[in-house]
Image (cartoon, helix red, strand yellow):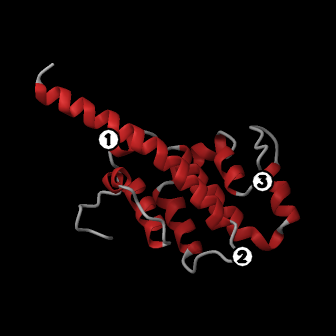
Amino acid sequence: MTDEQKAERKEVIAHNKEWDAAETVRREWLAQFLGRKTTPKNGQTVIAEALTGARWKIADGLTRGSSIAKVLLGMETAAEYGDQIAEYLTAHPRRAVHVTLAVVLGGIEQNTSRNTWRAPSADTAWYLRTLQGWGYPLCPVERIAAMLTDNTTE
């Protein structure tokens, strides 16, 4: 390997580690965020935009059981199968927007990986920028995935 290739490899490894750590922090932040009494003012708009702009990610999350959505809603024993989310909604009907937002965000989260920063996409950039708008502080590797330059805040 050339020195340049070694440097690139070192950067990839560092960014992958940073992504793994950020994923944990982001999901914990989302769980706390969705645990609030109210949803963000633009919550319903975000749901509509996600269902149209990131629909395949959300559909994939639904197909695979929305396991992340269950965790975001505080269902610690998030079994892969069953109707836990429907049961949660029945028990907490006033949290319908929270539940829908958790399903939408969980579907997007379920489709993020280390590759997200390597090959940024418009839908994931939109998602991360939305979280930033809600107060989530993006780390440097998330800023790459959000297609933000060092000087850009939105």
Res 112 visible: no
Pick out the residue farthest to the right. 91
Q: CA distance from mark 3 to mark 1?
A: 32 Å
Of the 4 image quadrants, the one containing the C terminus is bottom left
Q: Residue at x 33, y 54 (%)?
A: 140
Mark 3 vs mark 2: in front: 2
46 versus 141 height, above or below: below
66 versus 143 height, above or below: above
Say which label, 3 or 1, has the lower sequence index: 3
Return the residue at label 1.
118
Return the residue at label 3.
85
Pick out the residue farthest to the top. 1
Q: How many residues crowd mark 2 within 10 Å: few (<14), some (14–19), many (20+)?
A: few
Residues 86 and 27: in front is: 27
Return the residue at label 2.
37
Q: CA distance from mark 3 to mark 2?
A: 18 Å
Residue 17, percent across and down?
Answer: 41, 38
Q: Which mark is residue 50?
A: none
Q: Residue at x 81, y 49 (%)?
A: 84
Q: Amino acid at mark 2?
A: Lys
Q: Residue at x 31, y 52 (%)?
A: 144
Q: Tell me the element at label 1.
A: helix
Residues 67 and 11: in front is: 11
Q: Quadrant of residue 114?
A: top left
